Amino acid sequence: MLSTIILEDDLHQLQVIEEIVKNRIMINPTPHEYDMRVDLVTANPDEVVQFIQAHQAYCLITDIDLKHKLSGIDVAEIVRKNSRFSEIIFVTAFGQYLPLTITRHVEPLDFIFKSDDEGSMPQHLRETIDEAYGRYLKFIATPEREVERIAYHPTKGLVKTVAVDQLFYIQAVKGKSRLILIVGRNLHVETHGELANYDDTSLLKVNRGLVINPANVVELDTKNRRVYFDQDHIVACDISFRHLKELRKHLNEDVMK
């Protein structure tokens, strides 16, 4: 389902946009309702940041000047970076912000100007919703876009995701409760979390406090029960004896030494 977020600090405009979106979901050029839902309507950008969940698709409809430390462009960047699919629609009275959406690489689907003409903005928004939903249908119908990702929280209220194929390992930090270390290509971060949260991924448990991505192992030293993720043997992990046999099942013979 395409989750829709409406962010606008003018409460009247917020209600107008919400009504347009909900009506378009029900009444549109197709014979059926869109598989789309308005999940968050708010004037507070912080609520959007807290709402975002990994592995979802979003349509963000937002003003730019929100009288807040976060602008609509800031929020759009966060949504874009932390979702598998997103379409950004700006509805604003300030045309001077348009160049910023380009330099900040937000890539909005549309930039709709607020207007006193009640017939112009609503119709423009309806057509843009149609386009956003059409793109969503193409996204979910494209198998190669289905990339397994995991979520983590680098700071409170912020969710980031990383593709599993970019991960080397996730390790519980010794002596610190609910703190894990995530290591991957261009990634080395400590964050709050538990290894049990990753049981349903393709990561493999290799000792009590460690899960690894066997697809990224470049060498397994069976004598010393140690795996390496780079040719220089800089990134490495120790494997417990009881998990060694299971790990070997997931590796090619050419990486076993």
Image (cartoon, rainbow, N blue to C red):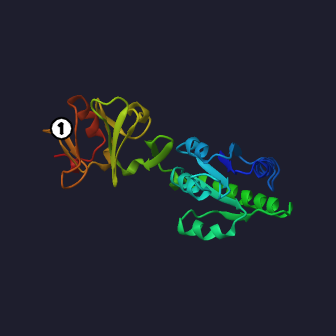
Image mark count:
1
Q: Above or below — where is 248 with respect to 165?
A: above
Q: Is residue 200 left or right of residue 100?
A: left
Q: Residue 243, position in %: x, y?
A: 26, 32
Seen from the viewer's position, the closer of residues 131 and 141 is: 131
Res. 138 visible in picture: no
Q: Identify residue type, mark 1.
A: Arg
Res. 214 visible in picture: yes
Residue at image position (24%, 51%) is 218
Residue at image position (22%, 32%) is 240
Q: Above or below — where is 50 with respect to 242?
A: below
Q: Residue 202, position in %: x, y?
A: 40, 41
Residue corresponding to mark 1:
225
Q: Residues within 10 Å of mark 1 (few under 14, many from 20)?
A: some
- Where disc 1 sits, the SS reads loop
Q: Residue 3, position in %: x, y?
A: 65, 46
Q: Residue furthest left?
A: 223
Q: Above or below — where is 116 with respect to 60?
A: below
Q: Above or below — where is 12 with respect to 51?
A: below
Q: Residue 156, position in %: x, y?
A: 47, 40
- The quadrant of the image that shows the N terminus is top right
Seen from the viewer's position, the closer of residues 188 and 220 is: 188
Q: Is residue 131 left or right of residue 230?
A: right
Residue 242: quarter of image:
top left
